[in-house]
Image (cartoon, rainbow, N blue to C red):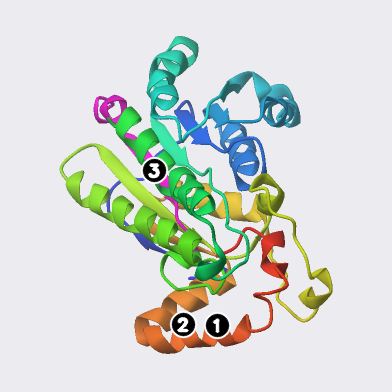
Amino acid sequence: MALEHCENHSHEEALRLEGRVVVLTGAGAGIGRELALILLSRGAKVAGVDLNAAALAETKSLAGHKGGGFEGFIADITDRSAVERLPEIVRTRFGTVDAVINNAGIIQPFLPLMDLDYPTIDRLFSVNLLGTLYVLKTFLPNLIARPEAHIVNLSSMGGFVPVPGQTIYCAAKAGVKLMSEGLASELLNSNVRVTVVFPGAVATNIAGNSGIKARGESKREGRAKPMSAAKAAEIIVDAVERNAHHVYVGRDSSMMNMLTRLDPQFAARALAKKLNGLLSSGDLAATNQP
């Protein structure tokens, strides 16, 4: 097992993506865009969901000759009624849905809990946890009706180890982790399998897309280079094709997973010490944080 990522496998037959229809949230940028491109390259058809029409169009353009298998759908995943309209709209274009990837998410301003206002807190839970829930509940009847189907939820390294300055983000992502695991248990006797992904630091523009201005770039020296979004997406798609249950993306996520299992308090303190001095600078907002 490579240190770059680790995963827990199911013993069941893997999912072949060729010819499958995949609903992918956050398809306009970052890991979502790279997921769309890799899925298309492997023969899947992608219903990309995003708030940004221009970003969706760019994803389709980047797909080149395979862009015909991509269709963008503008929707706000925090709007439950908008999400509930998606299955019929997607069905009109593609006929069916075989998999759902809940990738869309935002980070919080790099601030301690006491300094976060309630509108920001509400938005973090709405996008990261409730948005994922709405998409899951909306598409689950479609997936259960398929001979074989898959759900992929992106949690975070912050879903199992606390990141100072991202406490509410971590709480939401921990909710995604437990919701995914609970759903996987409920679906054991069905044809639907669930993969939960824990990315570490990935180089994306999640800060800008979250409405956060990154600061303190000079303090990045000496820190590990974040994984590229393309590499993270490749690891995720490979894991889905192998029917992995848990996927830890990046050396930081893999190592913190092992350390947390050994001694959770030590792991939390080690990460807090590593990030000491960054809380006021907001430096971590420049990457898709744990």
Total labels: the figure holds: 3
Q: Residue at x 72, y 60 (%)?
A: 286
Q: Which disc, if any, is residue 268?
A: 2
Q: Position of residue 222 (x, y in %)?
A: 77, 81
Q: In the image, what residue type sits under mark 1?
A: Ala
Q: In the image, what residue type sits under mark 2?
A: Ala
Q: Is residue 41 visible?
A: yes
Residue 4 relative to residue 155: left or right: right
Most foreground residue, 216 or 90: 216
Tell me, yes or no, whether the two marked residues, 2 and 1, touch with CB atoms within 8 Å.
Answer: yes
Query: In the rendered structure, does residue 89 fall within the stretch colored magenta?
Result: no
Q: Residues within 10 Å of mark 2 (few under 14, many from 20)?
A: some
* Disc 1 from disc 3: Cα separation: 28 Å
Report helix, strand or loop for mark 2.
helix
Q: Earlier in the sequence, mark 1 or mark 3?
A: 3
* Disc 2 from disc 1: Cα separation: 6 Å
Q: Position of residue 261 (x, y in %)?
A: 36, 80
Q: Is residue 6 visible?
A: no
Q: Position of residue 231 (x, y in %)?
A: 64, 55
Report helix, strand or loop for mark 3.
helix
Asked if 164 appears above or below 168 in the picture, the reply is below
Q: Residues within 10 Å of mark 3 (few under 14, many from 20)?
A: many
The residue stretch that appears in magenta: 141-156
Q: Residue at x 49, y 59 (%)?
A: 169
The residue wearing badge 3 is 130
Asked if 218 appears above or below 244 in the picture, the reply is below
Q: Residue at x 55, y 71 (%)?
A: 112
Query: In the rendered structure, does residue 145 fall within the stretch colored magenta?
Result: yes
In the orientation shown, which residue stands out farthest toward the left? 189
Residue 219 relative to residue 251: left or right: right
The residue wearing badge 1 is 272
Q: Position of residue 198 (x, y in %)?
A: 47, 60
